Amino acid sequence: MLAHKGFDGVIQGATLSDLIQMECLALSTRAVRVAGSGTSGRLFFTGGQVVHAEVGELKGEVALFEMLRWATGSFTIEEGVRPIEESIQRDWHNLLLEAAHHADEGTVTLPGSVVPLPPPKSTADLMNEAFNDSEVVHAAHFSEDGTLLASKGEDPESLQCTFAYVVQLLRHVGTSLGAENLKEINLLAPEQKALCLVDEKATTVMITTPKANFTNLAKKLA
Amino acid sequence: MQNVLTALKDIPGVVGSFVLNDKGALVSREMPAIYPDEIYPEMGRRLVGVYEAIALQVASLGDLVLKFEGYWFLCRRSAQCFLGILTTETVNYPALKMATNVALKQIDEQVASLPPLIVEKVAVPEVAVAPAPAVEVKKRFWRGTLID
């Protein structure tokens, strides 16, 4: 059996970040095997930079951040060991800052990990949210084939007719100017404003008070 | 008026601009050469149509901003004319708005001082006139020699 080379230790009262700082400041080139949270991983240092990390199937920064989450653990230093690959390019300062940032937020989002997104809102929900904005006076949402899908205020059919016509005319204006794919129309009048969002399938038009914030309204429908 | 339109190009992102009279006929332009004069009558007719349609439904419209893929088109209406400006989508819109406030004031004064005949003369006709049928010209001879 080969003699074990290097030091063993238990991290108590110090963190893995402290160990990384020490290794980097000492310009180390070696590996550190870290055990904690019922598993183990390895950190590789070359010339005072963290160049590779691995925990189980994880590699690179993902593995490093995983190890930095462990509250306690033990380590074994393996002198002169170099990694087979270099999966981390960032400076060690940046890595530790990002780890500290995650810790401050109380949530750890590992780079490359999949964060579940909230379920997407339905078109009807988005319309309700936008149309219920207090600055929206009249609104209509209609399909390209002329079906009125949602509305607010009186006489939405008339609003639909007007803007179906306006959108067609303005697409032609765009074509004359060599500009394609009309996405948005802003109409500004002293008493009222109008925001019209256009895509291939449907058009949404909102007549608003002059105070309305078009950016916010458009975001609600995004 | 050309100077006023040229000055709008001081705003980064402005591709070009043009002025239409209240009927939609071209009065002046400072647009890249790739845009032929033939586009303005149709564009003018459509813009006037848009303003009229909006006036029926909503209110008398002042400014119109069209956002296309990569380009914006701003159309501002004054008492005398329409000012159209084609820009890239990266244009500084507040700066452009201020520049067009100034430009529109100057253009309005100039358009108001133009005799209607001149405005009509500069404008490109809305409908292309079909070429007149060729008239057969009789050859004239004098003492056996063609004189025309």
Image: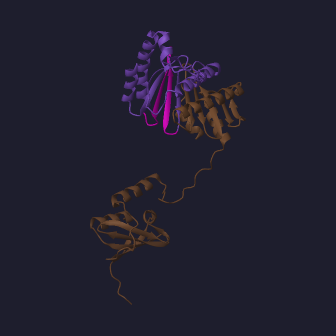
* Residue A15 seen from this side: no
* Residue A166 seen from this side: yes
Residue shown at the point (61%, 26%) measured from the top left:
A207
Question: Which secondary structure type mostly characterizes the magenta part of the structure?
Answer: strand
Residue shown at the point (49%, 11%) measured from the top left:
B117
Residue at the outermost front position: B143
Q: Which residues are magenta?
A: B69-91
The tint of chain B in the picture is purple
Depth check: give the residue in front, A158 or A59.
A158
The tint of chain A in the picture is brown
In the figure, residue A124 lies in which quadrant? Answer: top right
Residue B75 falls within the magenta-colored stretch:
yes
Please state the horizontal and vertical placement of residue A60, each as a whole percent of the image. Answer: 43, 65
Q: Is residue B103 above or below residue A131?
A: above
In the figure, residue A127 lies in which quadrant? Answer: top right
Residue B77 falls within the magenta-colored stretch:
yes
| In the image: residue B62, left or right of residue A98 | right
Residue at the outermost left position: A26
The quarter of the picture where the N terminus of chain B appears is top left
Depth check: give the residue in front, A119 or B133.
B133
Q: Is residue B89 above or below residue B118?
A: below
| In the image: residue A179, left or right of residue A25 | right
Please state the horizontal and vertical placement of residue B128, each as a whole percent of the image. Answer: 57, 24
Depth check: give the residue in front, A178 or B60.
A178
Residue shown at the point (40%, 28%) measured from the top left:
B95
Please state the horizontal and vertical placement of residue A104, each as a whole percent of the image. Answer: 43, 53
| In the image: residue B33, left or right of residue A165 | left
Please state the horizontal and vertical placement of residue B131, each as a whole percent of the image. Answer: 58, 23
